[in-house]
Image: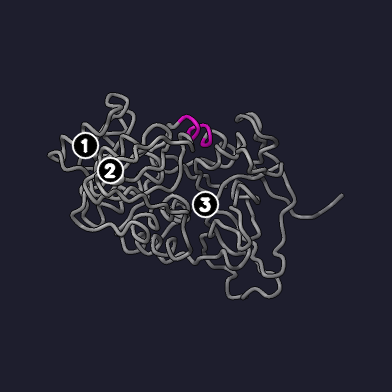
Amino acid sequence: MSNSPTMRVVALQAHGGLDQFKLDTWPRPEAEDGHALVEVKACGLNYMDVFVMHGMPGMPTKMPRIPGGDIAGIVRSVGAGTDPSWVGKKVALFPRFPKGGVLGENGNGGLCEYISVDEEQLIEIPEGVSFEQAAALPIAYGTSHRMLFTRGHVQKGEKILILGASGGVGVSCIQFAKMVGMEVFACTSTEEKGRKLQALGADHIINYSDEPKFSKAVWAATGKTGVDVAVNFTGGDTWIETQRSMAKGGRILTCGSTAGHECEIDVRFLWHRETEIIGSRAYVPDDIRACLDHVASGRLEPVIETLLPLERAVEGIGLMENRQVFGKVIVTP
């Protein structure tokens, strides 16, 4: 009988629904050369985990697969060639592997008790930041930080429209926008979410369940001048309405397409209003460090709505799938 150490994991056995996840016991990994073994203290869920569950055309995922791309924990050991001073430090993990791919999608993620990662993925957590806070940041807040500041160059006093405002990226966009003094127009699907967004600081709430032609509400609220910036990672049938909402010289920022990749646009708005469309791929380590520093300084408080133990992690993925989440879901192994 083997005495090798084991760990609990939640692993996806095959593409499909929530019934394809299994709470299981696996061998505990070891820190390979250039790697560190991290004891997982918190793991944040993202809509990416829903995509992985269902399977994405052209993006094969080896099974079984442990989901979860936002990870925080403690370095317990290191492999040869890794700086030994990492041992005992609190870390957040950069979700992208050095050679490409993402934790929880192209390699195992954080719905487990231990994970071995490349030293390049280690980001030290500053004093005053909890594991749960750190695990809320990398993908959603890191993506928003890069999209708004590095790519979008948002400025104090500008008007910004945010679609899908109640999810992780949307909520973080609102927080960053208010941090720099922007006027925020937030689109959401329910009155309850609208109240939460208003409490978060959104200046104008648009319920697109009631107002699918949301540009009319934007146009009225801005005195027929439109917004300077729009964040649209929804895709689907929302693009023309977004274009109609823009001020002359405005810029549309996009980092995804959760409602569909094929989007209809009206090219007349591109020249008539001189609209820029700016893509933002994801995040870099400095985005995550900046987010951690904002939390440590008290400028930012990540919105964590749900905390779940590992054995209830699948409930969290179900909440994500049904869009019943405001902010982040965090699992604590």
Compare marks 1 and 2 and give the one earlier in the sequence.
Answer: 2
Q: Is residue 318 magenta?
A: yes
The kind of secondary structure the magenta stretch mainly shows is: helix
* Front one among 175 and 246: 246
Residue 92 location (% of width, % of height): 51, 60
Please give the label number shown on residue 161: 2
The amino acid pointed to by label 2 is Leu
Q: Which residues are magenta?
A: 316-322
The amino acid pointed to by label 3 is Asp
Q: Secondary structure at mark 3?
A: strand
The amino acid pointed to by label 1 is Val
Q: Which residue is mark 3?
A: 70
Q: Which residue is mark 1?
A: 218
Residue farthest along the top direction in this orientation = 210
Q: Quadrant of residue 161?
A: top left
Residue 330 location (% of width, % of height): 48, 45
